[in-house]
Image (cartoon, helix red, strand yellow):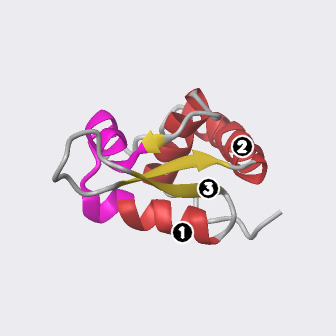
Amino acid sequence: MPRSPDASPQTLLVLAALLEAPDAWHYGYDLSRRLGLRSGTLYPILVRLAERGCLETRWVEAERPGRPPRHTYRLTADGRALARSRLAAAEPARARPSREVSGG
C-alpha cells in the first residue's frame, strides 16, 4: 500500500466524499462545491492522493465545444482501503467529548 497522506480534516472530508461512490469518477469542481473547499485546498489534496497511488486520474473531453477537458478522479483499491481505515480511526476522536477548561 502506498505511503499514507496526512489525515487533515480536509483530507478526511475528501476521502469520505470519494468513498460514498468509490467506483465513480468525480470532477474536482464538483467536489469543491459539494465540500465547500477552495481549489487551493482541494487540488493539492487530490494531487497528493494521486501521487501516492490512492486515486486514478483521467482527462475527459468537454461536453460542449470550445470548453477545455476536465480532470476526473476515482479511488483505487488502495485508496478505498486507506479511506476506510483513516475514517474509522477518526471516528473515535470525533465521538470523544471535548474537555473545556474552566477558569476558577
Residue at 71 percent across and 50 percent down: it is: 76
| 22 within the magenta span | no
Please name the amino acid that badge 3 sits on.
Answer: Leu
Asked whether the beta carbons under mark 3 and mark 1 sit within 8 Å of each other, the answer is: no
Residue at 46 percent across and 62 percent down: it is: 45
Disc 2 designates what residue? Answer: 80
Classify 68 as above or below 95. Answer: below
Q: Is residue 101 left or right of residue 79?
A: left
**Numbered mark located on residue 48 in the image:** 1
Query: In the structure shown, which secondary structural element does the residue marked by tag 2 occupy?
Result: helix
Residue 104 in view of the camera: no
Task: Measuring from the top left, give residue 61's x and y in whole percent.
Answer: 36, 50
Front disc: 3 or 2: 3
* Residue closest to the eye, 55 or 62: 62
Please name the amino acid that badge 1 sits on.
Answer: Arg
Query: In the structure shown, which secondary structural element does the residue marked by tag 3 occupy?
Result: strand
Disc 3 designates what residue? Answer: 55
**Residue numbers of the magenta segment:** 27-42
Please, which residue is most extreme toward the front here? 65
